[in-house]
Amino acid sequence: MDNASVPHEPNASVPHEPPVAGNEIDTLTGALERQRRTFAWKCEGLDAAGLATRLPPSSMTLGGLLKHLALVEDEYLTRRLLGRELPAPWDTVDWDADPDWEWRSAASDTPEQLYGLWRDAVGRSRAHVREAVAEGGAGHVAAYTTRSGESPLLRRLLTDMIEEYARHLGHADLIRESVDGRVGEDPPAGF
């Protein structure tokens, strides 16, 4: 394992879990941050071989999950929430020709690239959520419009993000345990 490659940077301003009796936005963002923190811990400190480990018959890897969740962060909280163009590397991908590009291309990325891509996407997402909250709270209307002509509210996008992380944390649990035996539900204190 390469302990220099850590996807998580402790930040005192970011909650480690939702408040017990908080308002709606603090509860939603706290729940999302708990998922992000646990995901970071499941991926933390792995080298290229660890990030490329898979459990057959699945082709899913922790490296692929890092890249996929970075894309999901940008898709939901950059494009859908604020209507902004996706940043690099997503802006140059032909998604029609290669809809699973992030999963496939992760195998060619270094651990530093994968960790950095995810960390940067999370940073953008946090800033974009703060911006939307300042403009309308959890009821901020997203720029995205569904096929039926509806625009989701920030609360719906945050719920979707929590669901996406929760789904993939199960995958990350199994893959990480197969790499080095790391198990557990919560990162250690101070992570």
Image: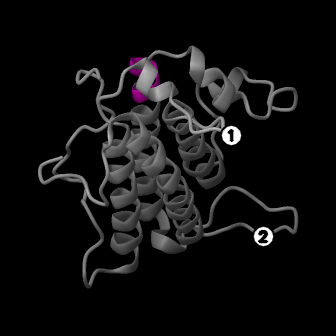
Residue 13 locus on image (x, y percent)? 20, 53
* Mark 2 neighbour class, 10 Å CA radius: few under 14, some 14 to 19, many 20 or more: few
Residue 130 got which mark? none
Give the residue at mark 1.
Answer: 57
Q: How is the image coloured?
A: one colour
Q: Residue at x 38, y 38 (%)?
A: 43
Q: Is residue 27 left or right of residue 186?
A: right
At label 1, the amino acid type is: Pro
Q: Looking at the image, which is closer to me, 182 or 135?
A: 182
State which mark lies toward you, 1 or 2.
Answer: 1
Total count of labels: 2
Q: At numbered mark 2, what does the secondary structure look like: helix, strand or loop?
A: loop
Closer-to-camera residue (168/82):
168
Q: Residue at x 55, y 59 (%)?
A: 167
Judge from the rendering whether residue 184 lies leftward or rightward of residue 117; answer left or right.
left
State whether residue 35 is above or below residue 150.
above
Residue 85 spot, x, y in % from top left:
66, 35
Q: Residue at x 36, y 44 (%)?
A: 42
Q: Main secondary structure of the magenta part?
A: helix
Residue 76, x across and y down, in percent: 60, 51
Residue 73 highlighted magenta (yes or no):
no
Decide which of 183, 35 is in the foreground and name it: 183
Q: Picture quarter containing residue 74?
A: top right
What segment is highlighted magenta in the picture?
111-115
Write down the residue under mark 2.
Answer: 150
Q: Amino acid at mark 2?
A: Glu
Which residue is located at x 29 percent, y 56 percent? 184
- Counting residues from the start of the chain, the first of labels 1 and 2 encountered is 1
